Image (spheres, rainbow, N blue to C red):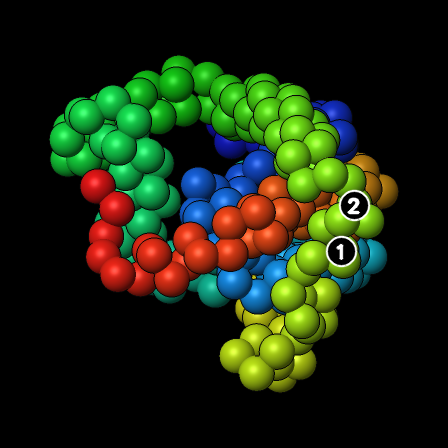
């Protein structure tokens, strides 16, 4: 049980931190935030910076408390705190909600597969779901951790290639800044105000601190100090990564300012 749900309870903190970072990452990250970066500029970076603040707060105060519980699953924790009947209600609710949340996670990936390969989206969802079930069932949390770390390596390599190519295309950072639209580097705008940033930051705080998919990363390390480092690594990565991720779509706005107006005329096929 401990090996399957907590990777033996002695997972290296840096691997757990990278896994937490990649678990919060999805195909929608570049689609949603990239779209905002193209249209609104620096606002997209400000939005994602709220995840950095959430990670640091969790590292200081919440992650070590989770590690001290020694709970292997959310159901076990709820049973210990609130009793078996409450745990049953939680399980039924979790199964129902997971039908929708898991579909939401699989959909954007399946959509990318459909566009790039022509495989129908329904087939992609089924195949991806079965593959994920197999490697998770066989390898437990270790399989998920290793997959996340490998994804981090691939993602980092891809981004480190795209960013300098984008800057070279625009003629350097100075040209990019000088040609950018007015207020392109403002921290907030009318749509994404400071009120929105505070609300979104609180959402991230509660979500990363309480969702068991992320809590596992705090409980699977050896000590409360390691659990703190998991949260801090997540926060540090979200301090740096939004700037690197959002530069290409921001640069593309300068290179092709008419793309958004053309896109609004109809869907892309």
In the rendered structure, the answer to whether residue 77 lies left or right of residue 13 reads: left
Foreground residue, 239 or 30?
Answer: 30
Measured as percent of width and height from the top left, residue 48 is found at 64, 58
Q: CA distance from mark 2 to mark 1?
A: 6 Å
Instruction: Look at 39% across and 18% down and name the residue there.
Output: 135
Q: Report the residue at 44% width, 57% height from top.
A: 258
The residue that appears at 58% across and 70% down in the rendered structure is 200
**Residue 137 sits in which quadrant?**
top left
Check residue 173 in the rendering and tell me which mark sits there, or answer none: 2
Please tell me in which quadrant of the rendered image residue 234 appears.
Answer: top right
Kindly identify which residue carries mark 1. Answer: 177
Image vertical order of residue 195 relative to residue 158, above or below: below
Residue 100 position, x and y percent, is 26, 53
Whole-percent x, y for residue 107 in the image: 28, 43
- Place residue 61 in its image quadrant: bottom right
**Contact? badges 2 and 1 (CB < 8 Å):** yes
**Residue occupying image coordinates x 57% and y 47%:** 255
Residue 201 or residue 33, whichever sits in front:
33
Whether 71 is drawn above or below 153: the answer is: below
């Amino acid at each position: 049980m401990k090996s399957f749900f907590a990777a033996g309870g002695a997972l290296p903190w840096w691997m757990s931190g990278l896994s937490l970072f990649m678990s919060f990452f999805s195909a929608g990250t570049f689609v949603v935030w990239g779209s905002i970066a193209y249209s609104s500029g620096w606002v997209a970076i400000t939005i994602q910076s709220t995840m950095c603040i959430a990670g640091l707060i969790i590292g200081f105060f919440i992650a070590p408390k989770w590690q001290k519980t020694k709970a292997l699953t959310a159901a076990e924790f709820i049973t210990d705190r609130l009793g078996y009947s409450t745990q049953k209600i939680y399980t039924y609710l979790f199964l129902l909600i997971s039908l929708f949340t898991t579909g939401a996670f699989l959909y954007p990936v399946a959509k990318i597969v459909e566009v790039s390969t022509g495989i129908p989206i329904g087939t992609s969802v089924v195949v991806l779901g079965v593959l994920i079930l197999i490697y998770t069932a066989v390898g437990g949390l270790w399989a998920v951790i290793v997959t996340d770390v490998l994804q981090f390596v691939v993602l980092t390599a891809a981004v480190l290639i795209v960013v300098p190519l984008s800057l070279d295309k625009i003629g350097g950072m100075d040209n990019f800044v000088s040609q950018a639209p007015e207020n392109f580097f403002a921290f907030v705008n009318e749509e994404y105000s400071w009120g929105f940033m505070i609300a979104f930051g609180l959402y991230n705080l509660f979500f990363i601190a309480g969702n068991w998919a992320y809590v596992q990363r705090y409980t699977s390390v050896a000590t409360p100090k390691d659990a703190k480092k998991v949260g801090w690594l997540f926060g540090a990565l979200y301090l740096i990564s939004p700037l690197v991720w959002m530069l290409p779509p921001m640069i593309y706005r300068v290179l092709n300012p008419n793309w958004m107006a053309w896109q609004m005329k109809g869907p892309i096929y």
